[in-house]
Amino acid sequence: MTSATLGIDTLAVEVTNISRHGLWLLLWDEELFLPFTEFPWFREAPVGQILNVEAPSPDHLYWPELDIDLAVESIRHPEKFPLVSKTGSTHPTQ
């Protein structure tokens, strides 16, 4: 007898640590660091909202309560995705 897998993998992405310097994500089997200097939208965000992260696809992360979308590649190589700021804007452009 074979059991079918039900639902989706809810642990595909998990915030494993938050410090004054940034946050760490476990994305499947890869650990990623998001420094607040490169990802400033998380610096003042409530912990509960940072912890609520989804992986709608293998190359995309989404924080619904913060309305932040990030390409995984922009986390791995932030130097390839320079921040573009508009006055008053608090959302990522990556």
Image (spheres, rainbow, N blue to C red):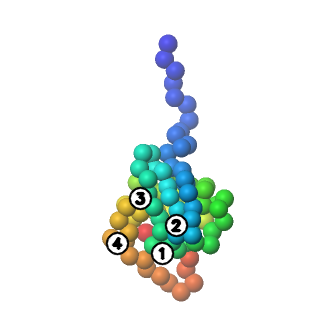
Question: Which mark is nearer the camera, 2 or 3?
Answer: 2
Nearest to N terminus: mark 1 or mark 2: 2
Residue beneath disc 1: 37
Nearest to N terminus: mark 1 or mark 4: 1
The x, y position of residue 4, in whole percent, is 51, 24
Residue beneath disc 4: 79
| Outermost residue toward the top in this view | 1
Picture layout, residue 28 above or below residue 83: above
Of the numbered discs in the image, which one, if any, rests on residue 22? 2
SS label for mark 4: helix
**Left or right of residue 20: residue 84:** left
| Outermost residue toward the left in this view | 80
Q: Amino acid at mark 4?
A: Glu
In the image, what residue occupies the spot 47% across and 64% down?
Answer: 34
In the image, what residue occupies the spot 66% across and 65% down?
Answer: 46
Picture layout, residue 8 above or below residue 66: above
Crowdedness of circle 1 by 10 Å Cα count: few (<14), some, many (20+)? few
Residue beneath disc 3: 72
SS label for mark 2: strand
Nearest to N terminus: mark 4 or mark 3: 3
Separation (CA) of disc 1 from disc 2: 8 Å
Crowdedness of circle 2 by 10 Å Cα count: few (<14), some, many (20+)? some
In the image, what residue occupies the spot 52% across and 21% down?
Answer: 3
Separation (CA) of disc 2 from disc 3: 16 Å
Q: Amino acid at mark 3?
A: Val
Q: Amino acid at mark 2?
A: Gly
